[in-house]
Image (spheres, rainbow, N blue to C red):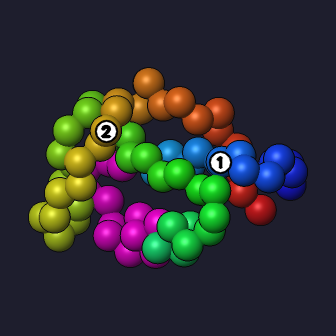
Amino acid sequence: MQEHAAGSSRQVTVLLFDGFQLLDVFGPVELLSGVPGVDIEYAGPSAGPVRSSRGCEVVATLPWRCSRSTPQRLP
């Protein structure tokens, strides 16, 4: 795993799609939100609301193509 300097942050982009499962998104988000230095953003097919399989909507702040994160596989 890549080491980060003290005080730096790691950007995590959650990719949303129509019909996503709430637990698949918010289980990891809940865990990562407690990690110091982790910033979470949401990306969808376009910026705006994305509907889950249960009808709840999450607002994507940017479209997939504009994600600021370089994709990395987490261990």
* Residue 21 sits inside the magenta stretch: yes
Name the residue located 59 percent from the left edge and 45 percent from the top edge.
11
> Is 52 on the left-hand or right-hand side of 74?
left
Q: Amino acid at mark 2?
A: Thr
Residue 28 seen by the camera: no
x, y percent for residue 68: 53, 30
Name the residue located 41 percent from the left edge and 32 percent from the top edge.
64
Looking at the picture, tell me which residue is in the foreground, 20 or 61: 61
Q: Residue 61's mark?
A: 2
x, y percent for residue 31: 54, 74
Q: Amino acid at mark 1?
A: Arg
User: In this figure, which residue is indicated by the disc labeled 1?
Assistant: 10
The quadrant of the rendering that contains the N terminus is bottom right
Magenta span of residues: 16-29
> Mark 2 and mark 1: span between their CA atoms?
17 Å
Measured along the vertical axis of the image, is residue 64 above or below residue 29?
Answer: above
Q: Circle 1: is it few (<14), some (14-19), or many (20+) Cα within 10 Å?
A: few
Q: Which comes before the other along the chain, label 2 or label 1?
A: 1
> Is 57 on the left-hand or right-hand side of 33?
left
